[in-house]
Image (tube, rainbow, N blue to C red):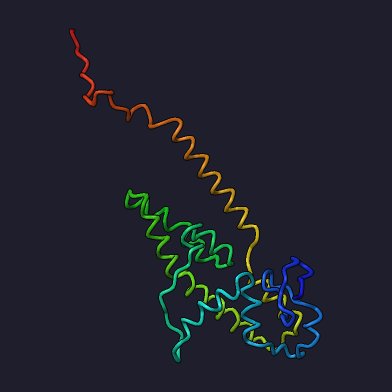
Amino acid sequence: MNACEKCEQQNPDDALFCMHCGAPFSAQVKDVPASGAWDETQLWRAFIGPNADRYMAQFRKFTTGPQPRFALTWHWPAFLVDPFLWFLYRKMYLYALVYAVGPVLSAYLTGDVTVGIVWRIMAGVSANYVYYWHVREHLARIRVQRSLDSAVRERLIQDLGGVQPYVVWLGVALHLLVLALLITLIREGPPEGSKSPPDGSKPAPSRNFF
């Protein structure tokens, strides 16, 4: 096993990049051709970063035919944690914006706060496929730039791929905030105006004797 100098994650001896943070291993990179003609699998692994094996297994389901096509998969983190946070974590900023605004706007227009569950289900079903195309398109753009040397290409992969570690702490902070709000609402109870009499009867109307 080969330990990454940047994050200390253990990696296979033949790995060119860290499977956790995407940092290149200097010893192995010396053996890479100057043209940057890396192995295709290693390119995908380097771009994906953490959990590359899991995503590669999911991506194979979309490439069983001559052309990539959608296949039903399920992504638990995008469903359970928060779609907005997961897309932000994987540097898919446009989708992060959609899932940040979409549920709120849908709840406002429909008056139903449970509509957010529908958005989570959509993310759980489509996240793997959306991420597959995200990786595929970015790697295609990197390959087109043949004039890039190996070091510049490695930096480009790290900038576009991998993850945003700060999003983990952002998610923890947001969930703690939501938990604090729920505890506050439970303690304070419903607003005074919405409380009904203990016996369930309506309050008697006031009478004027003028």
What x and y, as percent, mark residue 160? 64, 72
Residue at horizontal 19 percent and vertical 11 percent from the top: 208
Quadrant occupied by the N terminus: bottom right
Q: Position of residue 33 (x, y in %)?
A: 76, 91
In the image shown, does 50 or 142 lie closer to the viewer? Answer: 50
Viewed as shown, does residue 25 lie left or right of 134? right
Q: Nearer the viewer, residue 62 or 156?
A: 62
Quadrant in the picture for residue 41? bottom right
91 to the left or right of 201: right
- Taking the view exactly as shown, the residue that stands out farthest to the top is 210
Q: Quadrant of the C terminus?
A: top left
Q: Residue at x 61, y 58 (%)?
A: 167
Q: Is residue 120 left or right of residue 25?
A: left
How many badges with numbers are in the image? 0
Residue at screen point 66% across, 82% down: 42
Residue 141 image point, x, y percent = 60, 82
Give the vertical position of 150 relative to 91 (above or below).
Answer: below
Residue 195, compared with residue 101, is above or below; it is: above
Q: As displayed, is residue 191 above or below residue 142?
A: above
Query: As displayed, is residue 95 above or below residue 39?
Result: above
Residue 197 image position (x, y, % from top left): 27, 23
In the image, 146 versus 150, the foreground residue is 150
